[in-house]
Amino acid sequence: MRNFDYCTPTRLLFGKGVIAQLPAVMKPFGKRILLTYGGGSIKKIGLYQQVLELLKDFEIVECPGIQPNPKYDPSVLLGVRLCKEHKVDAILSVGGGSVLDCSKAIAAGACYDGDPWDLISYKVKAKAALPIVDIITLAATGSEYDCGGVISRTDTNDKIGYIDPLLFPAVSLLDPTYTFTVSPKQTRAGIADAINHVIEQYFTGETTLLTDGLCESTILSLMDSGRKCLANPEDYEARAEMMLCCSLACNDILSLGNSSSGWPCHSIEHALSGFYDITHGEGLAIITPPWMRHILSERTLPRFVKFGTRIFGIDAALDPWEIARKAIDETHRFFEGIGIPMHLREVGIDDSRIDEMAHHIAVNEGLEKAWAPLSERDIREILIASL
Amino acid sequence: MRNFDYCTPTRLLFGKGVIAQLPAVMKPFGKRILLTYGGGSIKKIGLYQQVLELLKDFEIVECPGIQPNPKYDPSVLLGVRLCKEHKVDAILSVGGGSVLDCSKAIAAGACYDGDPWDLISYKVKAKAALPIVDIITLAATGSEYDCGGVISRTDTNDKIGYIDPLLFPAVSLLDPTYTFTVSPKQTRAGIADAINHVIEQYFTGETTLLTDGLCESTILSLMDSGRKCLANPEDYEARAEMMLCCSLACNDILSLGNSSSGWPCHSIEHALSGFYDITHGEGLAIITPPWMRHILSERTLPRFVKFGTRIFGIDAALDPWEIARKAIDETHRFFEGIGIPMHLREVGIDDSRIDEMAHHIAVNEGLEKAWAPLSERDIREILIASL
């Protein structure tokens, strides 16, 4: 087991009706709140109005329009400017993981005098960040229980995972009923995103019986609850379980002491959505089986065998290579079965920029150091196999 | 799924050699440190000397002699007095869960003007507590990753679980090598303690596929790593895995959203060690199978079936009652197999005070509200079956 240094100070307030505690939650942080959100969905479900009503004794500065794959320009820059102009005390993020990711970058940028990109690109280490509270309306990224955010910069096709312990939300309010209206497409993408978060932690060199079990349990629960959410979008128990799984899936608690794998699928997918702005979870689902096929080797075989027998109940008495191949097929079949388009062409990506993306990933993501190292050529082959 | 409010702000510094970080860890809390510890074991393994050397720039006030089942008088009272006299800034607990439990009560008592028993007995809610850092030398209670402690008062036979979010350690340093010299008896007791912590969370009315899986994974890992620790006390991987399991086992992370079961085995065992000062983990192991037999009913049957099939691999095609009975037998057999005395008589408890203990538990522990409610008569029957 590797040494680790772990701390997640975020308070999770989970369940139906926890929104009622919002004023008490916000009070210790001050009066002036930057309210970040995306498009109209929080207005459609009445959450926007409810938040304003609950916070009528606070000064609210609005920062709307944060998009999926949140953009440095305009969203981060706008938020930072508003925080500085209005001397904001804290940020309240209402929406999905993209709004929260963007809010994290804003929180750090607001406490920094220079260009916020200095922080996101790790040129400068943040010294402080505004406190963040979030209300999550989409179970997917787990941003509510981690200290990272992914920010896209369209002028350079960069999509950077910006991670700093200063960015843990102080409080995350998670009410599963807010996810009742999440579309099937977004629900599927959330399932795929969270499952892939766990796969990234599971497929690595050093694990334990404990962390394997925690990871397998979370994947199995995501598959089961995810299917139920799709079958009945207002199934509270299923929405709640999926939501909790997503929070745990991107928090290191499932893989304490494991060696780090470098999160290769995320590294590859970040280029896809950086270049094409596709839905992150869909990109991950598409890449995962071709990545698995590509890295399957004598050395990685035992991981695939354990994955296949534990997740899909494949007969452990079969030949290990057969188990591994079946496990990969079943992974593909699961994603396909819940309705995710499983080819890049289906999400509008053809072969025209494959070389460019492979080069971009190879140069920026350091995947030659992953558990199953990937060269530019490997990445290109995985992308071609994903077409 | 039940609503929940969860936060564990403790930082876990885990692995071989993390002690080197102790000065940097302590520095933010101030100069004057109360060093709490037990008997001579930390001197025998050289840890005491190492801590003093590392903290030579701090002012150390020593509070030694904290016993297993830590006592209000003298230990808590002594620690509180020392903190007040020397205006201590923080507490460094070096030892097992008992030392840390006692340190938590001291931390709260040091910030309170009245009798510390007011706090422990919940007559008064603590408003503050000194920061606590701990170095754990025994994998068992999980006190390093929770906000509770158990304090015994010999004059009244009380053994109270004192829980307050103020009592989360700020930092827990966990180096598995410190547990190499833990005796087989204490190692067994630690395994039993941690397994029972998970059982208490698992045997309840409302659970999810996720929390069942997390609990099952932790029990399986404890059984496996625990056996390896007993076979080879210096097996680093096994000691590390057992240590991590213990930290997670008493933290609500494994059972988020589950209904609470009231921790009946702990409630019963607290009377046993309150009256007889036996080893907590042994008491738990002894009680667990008789408690299981007593509560097995049409209503509780499905839990036992899941436990039996998942933990012991009992054939799911068998009759459910047979699975349940086998599961209970296997639980007994596991504890017996690792060498725990499985009868109260073997740890010096006869039938002379059974009635008195049953009454004490019934009056103080509220087990009539447990998932499987227990009356005084039920408790008496479980105790008699444990003889």
Image (tube, coloured by chain):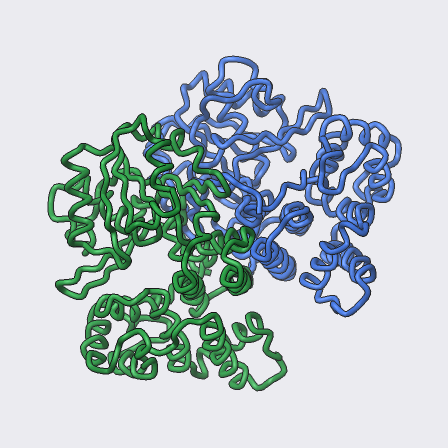
Chain colours: A blue, B green
Q: Is residue B109 visible?
A: yes
**Could you tell me which residue is drawn at 81 percent across and 36 percent down?**
A379
Would residue B288 appear left or right of A330 to someone viewing this image?
left
Q: Report the front residue among B238 and A257.
A: B238
Q: Is residue B216 visible?
A: no
Give the x, y percent position of residue A94: 50, 38
Give the x, y percent position of residue B254: 47, 57
Image vertical order of residue B28 relative to residue B142, above or below: above
**Could you tell me which residue is drawn at 60 percent across and 74 percent down?**
B313
Image vertical order of residue B189 relative to residue A243, above or below: below
Would residue A386 appear left or right of B144 to someone viewing this image?
right
Residue ranking furthest to the top: A114
Give the x, y percent position of residue B68: 28, 58
Q: Report the front residue among B378 and A118.
A: B378
**Could you tell me which residue is drawn at 53 percent across and 77 percent down?**
B305
**Could you tell me which residue is drawn at 28 percent across and 78 percent down?**
B379
